[in-house]
Image (cartoon, helix red, strand yellow):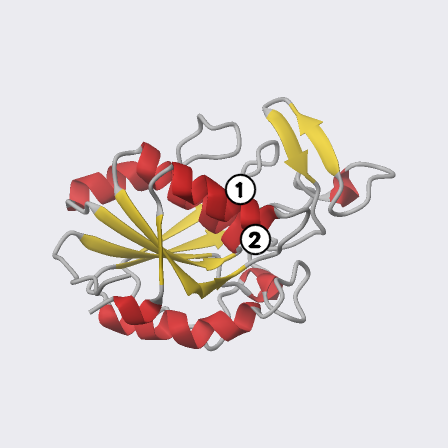
Amino acid sequence: MPAIARQPGDVLLVIDVQNDFCPGGHLAVPGGDDAVPVINGLIEQFDHVVLTQDWHPAGHNSFASSHPGAEPFSQTTMAYGPQTLWPDHCIQGSEGAAFHRALRWSKAQMVIRKGFRREIDSYSAFFENDKRTPTGLTGYLRERGFTRVFACGLAFDFCVRFSAEDARAQGFDCMVVENACRAIDMAGSAAATREAFAHNNVSLITASDIR
Ligand code: VGL
Ligand code: ZN
């Protein structure tokens, strides 16, 4: 991948770098905290930074604990389609929902919270899992005049994946900084993500590609 020169219409989108997605958290992504130094370098580099925060009420419908007898990481069907059931995580206001302590988030111009509706999960920073309920991020980015979204964070194969695909669907160019992400990787989901990116013109890049 040749060098990518930063442009005025670029925004860095940092997905869900929260304690519960890091080792020791309730839905730990292997090596999740190893991405933090790389992400901090990107935050320093970019003029415009937006963060997302997974932000569930207790008893959220995506939690296995809300479905008697269901195991975490099993599949179910919601009104809007298939849904993975997760351990309880990122409860609003909890320590698990806080940004990782090493993340240098203070430069962020906007924090988008998602997954706060009890009935609908939200992987994407743009739309909830019903694919229809907007978070407001498209409007924000358009009004700010951004055209290119550089995505990073956790998890590569869930929230980063769906955010990147929706960024493309909403008309933004999108690049995912792969060494600033870590994957959950269940049932081949990391490989499936790379395939989906190839089909949707989401570019996979490395932090050192960006100048
Ligand atoms: C995520 C599963 C459930 C993520 C959030 O940030 O990738 N994954 N909630
Ligand atoms: Zn969640």
How far across and down, in percent of the image, does residue 162 sit?
A: 46, 42
Callout 1 amino acid: Phe
90 with respect to 108 (left or right): right
Seen at 69% across and 47% down, the residue is: 86
Camera sees residue 125: no
Q: In the drawing, what numbered circle is on residue 116?
A: 1
Residue contact at pointers 2 and 1, CB within 8 angstroms = yes
45 with respect to 190 (left or right): left
Residue 198 image-quadrant placement = top left
169 with respect to 31 (left or right): left
**Label 1 SS:** loop
| Upstream in sequence: badge 2 or badge 1 | 2
Count of numbered marks: 2
* Outermost residue, front side: 1
Quarter of the image with the C terminus in it? bottom left
Q: Residues within 10 Å of mark 1 (few under 14, many from 20)?
A: some
In the rendered image of this protein, does residue 53 appear above or below residue 74?
Answer: below
Q: Nearer the viewer, residue 148 or 131?
A: 148
Q: Is mark 1 within 8 Å of ligand 2?
A: no
How far across and down, in percent of the image, does residue 205 sit?
A: 34, 60
- Distance of mark 2 from mark 1, alpha carbons? 8 Å
Q: In the drawing, what numbered circle is on residue 92?
A: 2
Q: Residues within 10 Å of mark 2 (few under 14, many from 20)?
A: some
Residue 179 image-quadrant placement = bottom left
How far across and down, in percent of the image, does residue 27 sit?
A: 66, 58
How far across and down, in percent of the image, does residue 200 sit?
A: 37, 37
